[in-house]
Image (cartoon, helix red, strand yellow):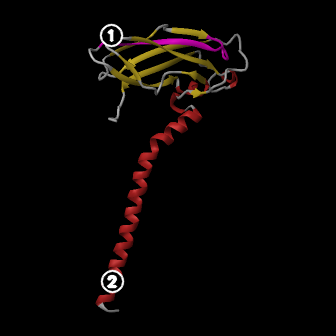
């Protein structure tokens, strides 16, 4: 083998390595962009991490004698000049009983601001049984200076919670929302 042939093979090997590395980098970038929506989907399907289940249907029946106290927590990121509180601090419901509660947001700043909220449920193992029918989460909320608005949440606890031995000890659930400044694109 001549020196020229060895150099040609080395460049061929280098090119192959470069293509493989570029492919790996491209795959990593693609996975980084896909990870958030895929993780969100995973959490919604499984209830992992206290993610509640969304449904358009009401419960099929109410299970009396197994009351669950649902507490409501409200938080605001420091960058958003809002006051955000649950109107009622808690409710006690039977699994399958549909409930509507309200949170109240007030813009205490001097300028119009837009917020959006995230939520979670604790204990996390109860997330799969917390069924939200309607809520304000992930929707942009625009408040004028001094404006207050009540934001309803309609939910029920899935009656199947009483049959799951892994959550039989759950008697208290906390639904927590946190508002953040919305990322508004210039149009």
Taking the spot 41% from the left edge, 25% from the top edge, the residue there is 116
Label 1: state its secondary structure.
Answer: loop
Residues under labels 2 and 1: Cα distance?
73 Å
In the figure, is residue 53 to the left or right of 141? Answer: right
Q: Which mark is residue 8?
A: 2
Label 2: state its secondary structure.
Answer: helix
Q: Which mark is residue 168?
A: none
Residue 180 screen position, x and y as percent: 36, 25
Q: Nearer the viewer, residue 32 or 65?
A: 32
From this view, report whether residue 5 is shown above or below residue 28: below
Q: Is residue 107 magenta?
A: yes
Q: Quadrant of residue 173?
A: top right
Find the residue positioned furthest to the right. 61
Tell me the crowding category of disc 1: few under 14, some 14 to 19, or many 20 or more residues within 10 angstroms, Cα based.
few
Q: Is residue 86 magenta?
A: no
Q: Nearer the viewer, residue 19 or 94?
A: 19
Taking the spot 57% from the left edge, 24% from the top edge, the residue there is 126
In the rendered image, the quadrant that contains the N terminus is: bottom left
Q: Quadrant of residue 131?
A: top right
Q: Quadrant of residue 143?
A: top left
Find the residue positioned furthest to the front. 187
Q: Which mark is residue 146?
A: 1
Find the residue positioned furthest to the left. 110
Q: Who comes first in sequence, dot 2 or dot 1?
A: 2
Q: Which residues are magenta?
A: 93-108
Q: Would you say the magenta stretch is mainly helix, strand or loop?
A: strand
């Amino acid at each position: 083998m001549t020196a020229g042939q060895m150099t040609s093979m080395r460049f061929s090997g280098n090119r192959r390595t470069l293509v493989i590395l570029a492919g790996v980098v491209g795959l990593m970038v693609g996975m980084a962009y896909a990870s958030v929506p895929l993780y969100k989907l995973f959490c919604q399907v499984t209830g992992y991490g206290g993610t509640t289940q969304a449904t358009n249907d009401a419960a099929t029946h109410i299970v009396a004698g197994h009351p669950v106290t649902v507490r409501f927590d409200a938080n605001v990121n420091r960058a958003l000049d809002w006051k955000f509180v649950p109107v009622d601090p808690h409710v006690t419901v039977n699994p399958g009983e549909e409930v509507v509660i309200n949170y109240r947001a007030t813009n205490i700043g001097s300028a119009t601001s837009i917020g959006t909220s995230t939520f979670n449920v604790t204990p996390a193992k109860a997330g799969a049984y917390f069924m939200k029918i309607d809520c304000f989460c992930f929707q942009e909320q625009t408040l004028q200076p001094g404006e207050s608005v009540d934001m309803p949440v309609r939910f029920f606890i899935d009656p199947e919670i009483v049959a799951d031995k892994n959550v039989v000890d759950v008697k208290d659930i906390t639904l927590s929302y946190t508002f953040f400044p919305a990322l508004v694109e210039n149009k």
